[in-house]
Image (tube, grey):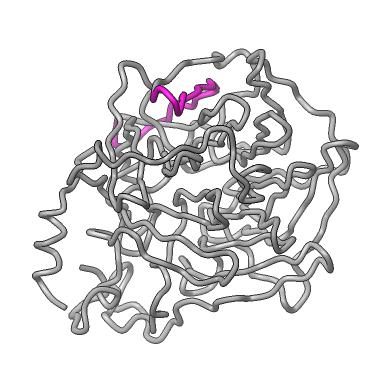
Amino acid sequence: MKSLTLFSLALLVACGNDKSSDSGEATPFSAPISCDDVGIDIPSGLGEASGAWDPAGRLVFFGGNDAVPIECAFGNTSFVGETWAYKPACEGFVRIETAESPQDRGRHVAVYDDVNHAMLIHGGRSRVEASGPYTLYGDTWSFDLSTDTWTKVTGAADGPSKRGNHGGAFARGKMYINGGNESTDGANFLLKNDTWAFDPTNNTWEKLSTTNKPANRLYHPMTSDGDHLYIYGGGDENALFGSGFMNDLWSLNLDTLAWTELSDGTEASAPVGRIWGSLTHDAANNRLVMFGGHDETPLGNNNELWQFNLENNKWKLLEAGDRLDNPENGFCDFPADYTTIVDGSPERREAGVSAQTGDGKLIIFGGKTDCGNINDVWSLDLSTDVWEEHSRATQGEACLRAYQECSSMCF
């Protein structure tokens, strides 16, 4: 993957105008952040990467796909196997060089392991050729956040089947995964609805015997409050073709292992179905917060902000996001005034990295947009629901978010 520099950003500007982390409490791993290793390099736009928040004060993420999508969303893959960190206090990125690391991949699960102060990843897929079957992964890796080293902790035969686009969360000292896709054919899905738990103290997987299971799915975000797992939406076998997007919300009780449908998505206040959004549990306000994703509306990628109140099981739209104004000139040919943008909100996206910080914020990096893959960093203050931009995009963003005058939607 090519990294960009702040010099590239200057050129762009010149052209125109988990439970402990949920609570916000300090952890045993909190420490003053050092900026000594922050340089001028920044990652290029990435979709399909995954990451976790390090309580020491950085967003760590691995892998992803930095290829420019063909026809807005399909084909064209360029998977990477790099490890990066963004340090908000230093306003910069660090490329973390390691002697060993997982194979290049995207669409994998990543969670913060608060027992071992590590980032765990599982699964994913990759492909070197421009077409043909994908390679699926079923291995589990641990990234030690104290030493910045990768260790492979299980192979593909030691737990869940090889898969990608599954949900993942960490609770009660374990990493949980749900669902996903087992197919190596990019045009067809083989979906799952199983739930597994990985114990990092002994590096073992256990398949959970859950009841009242949700439908098979992929592309669904997952989070936890420590006692429950939550999944929202995702897609079925037709998700690749712009239909089959789900909008149901489920909770798994980790004591009884029974799934409960909290919302079937039919109420008037509920979001429309979507894939590849982000979902986090906000303990201070007893709610789930959802951002972005790709839905079934004509706009597709969105930057909506939603909350689900866990006291009354009701959805509420917090920010409606960009509004569609003018149709495309042709397939994937967007006019400059395609949308009316919401000032102070991130670009519309799917498949980005998101994590909750220790001080009550949701931090996001990258994702797929109508303009390709993006490389910005934003945070949402969960006490005020106000966004803050930390690192400006150098690619993948609608022109109107950077300049006053634009001849087309994208840079």
Q: Is residue 141 above or below residue 401?
A: above
Q: Position of residue 300 (x, y in %)?
A: 48, 68
Q: Residue at x 38, y 53 (%)?
A: 366
Left/right of residue 304 with respect to residue 47 in the rendered view: right
Q: Quadrant of the C terminus?
A: bottom left
Q: Is 138 in the magenta? A: yes
Q: Residue at x 78, y 44 (%)?
A: 228
Q: Which residue reaches farthest front? A: 32
Q: Residue at x 50, y 24 (%)?
A: 137
Left/right of residue 109 with respect to residue 224 in the rendered view: left
Image quadrant in which you'd find residue 310: bottom right
Q: Position of residue 318 (x, y in %)?
A: 60, 76
Q: Is residue 208 above or below residue 190?
A: above
Q: Is 105 in the magenta? A: no
Q: Residue at x 17, y 46 (%)?
A: 40
| Number of marks present in the image shown | 0
Image quadrant in which you'd find residue 66: top left
Q: Position of residue 47 (x, y in %)?
A: 39, 48
Using the image as rendered, state which of residue 271 and residue 333 is in the foreground.
271
Q: Position of residue 380 (x, y in %)?
A: 50, 64
Using the image as rendered, state which of residue 80 and residue 118 is in the foreground.
118
Q: Is residue 229 above or below residue 370?
A: above
Using the image as rendered, state which of residue 156 and residue 130 is in the foreground.
156
Q: Which residue reaches farthest right? A: 256
Dominant SS in magenta: loop
Residues in magenta, as a range = 129-148
Q: Is residue 114 above or below residue 98?
A: below
Let me know if residue 164 appears in the view.
yes
Q: Quadrant of the N terminus?
A: top left
Left/right of residue 307 with respect to residue 164 in the rendered view: right
Let me know if residue 107 appears in the view.
no
